[in-house]
């Protein structure tokens, strides 16, 4: 085994009376992808900031190639030592060109004037390292999110770092874009770079990782080869309890009644098939299927966000006008979309304003918003959801993914919601927050709401829901009690449309 390029020993860091890191040991080796796992608040961000010199450690050793690093390291000294970082929130300047962003602080010049030819050539060489062939003089603001991410990586790699830290790099990327980035990281490993990879997406860790260190409450709970873990055992190390304990008990839900949500012959736009779906009060129904099966399209058609080609939706026997979200809300239907940042949240508004936006009529008088009435109605719901925020007046963009999802849930709970549609409810949410959301969903079902959950993560459906509807190319190919289903049987249905005998189809 090669000697570690970076070695941390007994590292400690406190902020006031809060212990952020306690006796943390970590080793990063050349040619290895080392994953860092843990819930929000586990200490991952603090550890990264210590490594990059953004935060001083209080105690412990920090060595690079065996040489001790000073306590007052500083970001410049960390970069000089060969340590680079790609953060979730990009640091590119949108009004500058790609080339200017890549070479900022060292623009090639001749006679005090920027040499545009050299600028373009040097930037193109850096872009080539990440497989980008775009014009280096393109303004950054014109680039899609995935390309900006690659430009950020090209800037970091331009310093020829020996260590690269990736902090949630695939959050804003599509599936194909994320896979391309993971291939790039695998190539870095082959080039002898030491990679520290941080992500809530455990499947990415298992795909590219060699080893993993798990943090919980600022302390290392386990370190080992990823091959020693299963996804369930890794989650257990992160949260301190078995995966089965994350999900609510189904026994607490009320007896089944007549369908509260009744969907008949609903054909979303772009689909050749119509869907029938019943969801009873107190029931949680999961929707499974491969990418492109029409899961999200079904929820949006039920809510009216995308008017369906045909079909009807009823809530408690009353028909909801087709393709009209406002009427769906009045009927008691709420939708939490998959892309909460683009389609759900209003990032510049406060937490309280984001919650009240779906119920403005109830908190207004003669067209004027009553702040007192807004606070009375909203704060009680947020308190009940145990939202972690310094103030409900702070921008919603400052919250973690799990707390942002609670804000969207609160938006519907302040209305007379009776049916909740969740599209990938735990996407981009850490494991501890997932457990809270599962409990909330179980509690809402116990209160008699009808709930539909779309999820790509089959263990989530098997642990959370009562019944799973499987879609294939827009058609229902199975309706399986969760207690009788397995991941294998659901995948068989989703990919072939045929049951393997484990469940009903």
Image: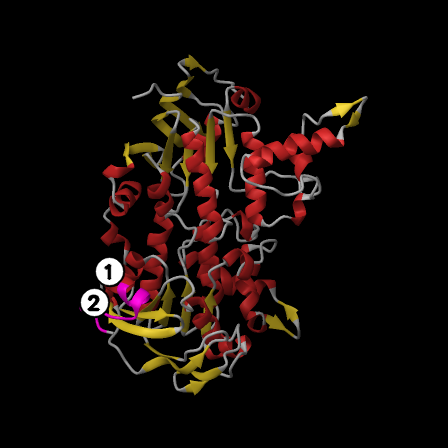
Residue 371 x, y percent position in the rendering? 60, 62
Q: Would you name the residue on which mark 1 appears?
A: 488
Q: Position of residue 208 (x, y in %)?
A: 37, 39
Helix, strand or loop at disc 2? loop
Q: What residue is at 39 percent from the left and 31 percent from the top?
A: 19
Viewer-side residue, 202 vs 75: 202
For disc 1, the neighbor class at 10 Å (few under 14, some 14 to 19, many from 20) is few
Between 36 and 74, the one lying in front of the other is 36
The quarter of the rendered structure image containing the C terminus is bottom left
Boundaries of the magenta span: 492-504
Number of on-image labels: 2
Magenta span contains residue 240: no
The colouring scheme, among rainbow, by chain, secondary structure or one colour, is secondary structure
Q: Are marks 2 and 1 in contact (CB under 8 Å)?
A: yes
Q: Which secondary structure class fits the magenta region best?
A: loop
Using a 10 Å C-alpha cutoff, classify the residue at mark 2 as few (fewer than 14 neighbours), some (14 to 19) or many (20 or more).
some
| Picture layout, residue 360 above or below residue 104 | below
Q: In the picture, which quadrant includes the N terminus?
A: top left
Residue drawn at (66%, 73%), measured in percent from left and top? 367
- State left or right for residue 434 relative to residue 96: left
| Whether residue 221 is situated above or below residue 248 in the rendered picture | above
Identify the image quadrant of residue 350: bottom right
* Image location (x, y in percent) of residue 87: 51, 38
Residue for badge 2: 500
Nearer the observer, 34 or 9: 34
């Amino acid at each position: 085994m090669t000697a570690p390029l970076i070695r941390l020993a007994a590292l400690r860091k406190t902020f006031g009376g809060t212990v952020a890191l306690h006796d943390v040991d970590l080793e990063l080796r050349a040619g290895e992808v080392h994953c860092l796992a843990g819930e929000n608040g586990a200490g991952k961000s603090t550890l990264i900031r210590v490594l990059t010199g953004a935060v001083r450690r209080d105690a412990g050793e920090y060595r690079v190639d065996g040489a001790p690093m000073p306590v007052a390291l500083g970001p410049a000294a960390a970069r000089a030592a060969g340590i680079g970082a790609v953060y979730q929130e990009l640091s590119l300047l949108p009004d500058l060109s790609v080339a200017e962003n890549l070479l900022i602080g060292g623009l090639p010049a001749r006679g005090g004037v920027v040499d545009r030819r050299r600028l373009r050539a040097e930037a193109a060489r850096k872009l080539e390292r990440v497989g980008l062939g775009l014009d280096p003089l393109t303004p950054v603001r014109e680039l899609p999110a995935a390309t900006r991410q690659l430009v950020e990586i090209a800037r970091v790699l331009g310093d020829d770092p020996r260590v690269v830290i990736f902090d949630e790099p695939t959050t804003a990327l599509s599936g194909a874009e994320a896979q391309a980035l993971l291939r790039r990281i695998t190539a870095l490993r082959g080039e002898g770079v030491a990679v520290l990879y941080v992500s809530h997406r455990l499947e990415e860790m298992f795909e590219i990782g060699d080893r993993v260190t798990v943090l919980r409450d600022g302390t290392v709970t386990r370190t080992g080869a990823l091959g020693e873990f299963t996804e369930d055992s890794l989650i257990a190390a992160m949260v301190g309890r078995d995966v089965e304990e994350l999900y609510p008990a189904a026994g607490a839900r009320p007896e089944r009644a007549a369908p509260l949500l009744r969907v008949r012959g609903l054909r979303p736009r772009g689909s050749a098939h119509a869907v029938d779906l019943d969801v009873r009060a107190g029931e949680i129904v999961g929707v499974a299927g491969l990418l492109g099966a029409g899961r999200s399209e079904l929820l949006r058609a039920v809510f009216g966000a995308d008017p369906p080609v045909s079909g009807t939706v009823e809530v408690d026997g009353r028909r909801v006008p087709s393709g009209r979200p406002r009427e769906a809300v009045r009927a008691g239907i709420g939708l939490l979309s998959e892309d909460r940042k683009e389609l759900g949240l209003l990032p510049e508004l406060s937490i309280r304003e984001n919650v009240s936006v779906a119920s403005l009529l109830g908190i207004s008088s003669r067209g004027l918003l009553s702040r007192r009435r807004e606070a009375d109605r909203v704060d009680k719901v947020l308190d009940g959801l145990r939202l972690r925020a310094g103030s409900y007046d702070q921008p919603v963009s400052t919250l973690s993914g799990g707390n942002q999802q609670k804000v969207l849930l609160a938006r519907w709970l302040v209305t007379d919601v009776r049916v909740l549609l969740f599209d990938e409810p735990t996407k981009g949410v850490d494991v501890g927050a997932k457990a809270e959301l599962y409990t909330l969903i179980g509690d809402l079902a116990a209160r008699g709401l009808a709930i539909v959950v779309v999820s790509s993560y089959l263990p989530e459906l098997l642990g959370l829901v009562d019944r799973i509807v499987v879609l294939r190319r827009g058609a229902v190919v199975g309706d399986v009690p969760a207690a009788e289903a397995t991941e294998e049987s659901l995948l068989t249905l989703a990919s072939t449309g045929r049951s393997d005998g484990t469940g009903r189809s």
